Amino acid sequence: MATPDRITEIKTSLAKPGHTQSFACDVALRTEECIVVYYRMTRDYNLHGIPLQAGNLTVGYFWFDRPYNLYHWIERDGTTSAWYFNIGDVTSFDGSTLEWHDLAVDILATPSGRIDILDEDELPADLDPALRSRIMQARDVVLGALAELTSDADITSAHLLATVPASPPVA
């Protein structure tokens, strides 16, 4: 198998002005509408009560024209742990660096039907009303299309998993 194409994902945050995070990701798919990346977890995490183990896969969907992105968390056996939507915008993509701005509000959904809207309390009290409205509208778009979005992610991720290198055994 050829070496995967790699990009750097850079995240800025409305809730933490001036703070950035960078992630090296492998590219699974590039289209004019989006870029899909994957990352194999190197350690165990617990995110909002969802246990994510070393070796699990995160498939990140970044659309250039949608006010959200999606992290699809997948177990080592290929089953879905959860879908995690970030309300935010891709601010630039030059082919090797993807920059996006996290607008604080997140939506966590699980196959068992759990749906949590997270971090609305992180929106600044003095946030511009137009931006607050745009964030809430994006939240509502995700919630209104949740079944379709998660189904599409399941189908696309399953197809892409066939091209992702197998994870090594966890010691």
Image (cartoon, rainbow, N blue to C red):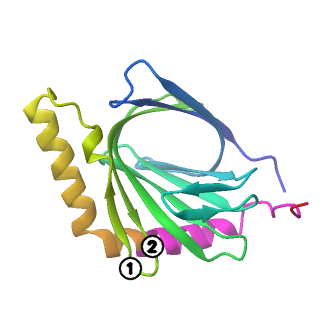
> Residue 124: image x %, image y %?
22, 31
Do labels 1 and 2 touch, CB within 8 Å?
yes
Mark pair 1, 2: CA separation: 5 Å
Check disc 2 and give the amino acid type: Thr
Question: 24 or 128, which is in the foreground?
Answer: 128
User: Of the numbered discs in the image, which one, if any, rests on residue 155?
Assistant: none
The residue sitting at the left extreme is: 129
Residue bearing mark 2: 110
Magenta highlight range:
151-169
Q: Residue visible at 86% across and 62% down?
A: 170
Q: Residue visible at 34% across and 49% down?
A: 68
Residue bearing mark 1: 113
Check disc 1 and give the amino acid type: Gly
Left or right: where 171 falls relative to 2: right
> Residue 1: image x %, image y %?
84, 57
The residue sitting at the top extreme is: 18
Q: Residue visible at 16% across and 29% down?
A: 127
> Residue 17: image x %, image y %?
37, 21
Q: Secondary structure at mark 1?
A: loop
* Screen quadrant of the C terminus: bottom right
Q: Is residue 77 above or below residue 31?
A: below
Q: Is residue 97 magenta?
A: no
Neighbour tally class for label 1: few under 14, some 14-19, many 20 plus, Cα within 10 Å: few
Question: 143 or 49, which is in the foreground?
Answer: 49
Question: 27 or 48, which is in the foreground?
Answer: 48
Q: Is residue 168 magenta?
A: yes
Q: Residue visible at 68% across and 39% down?
A: 6
Q: Secondary structure at mark 2?
A: loop
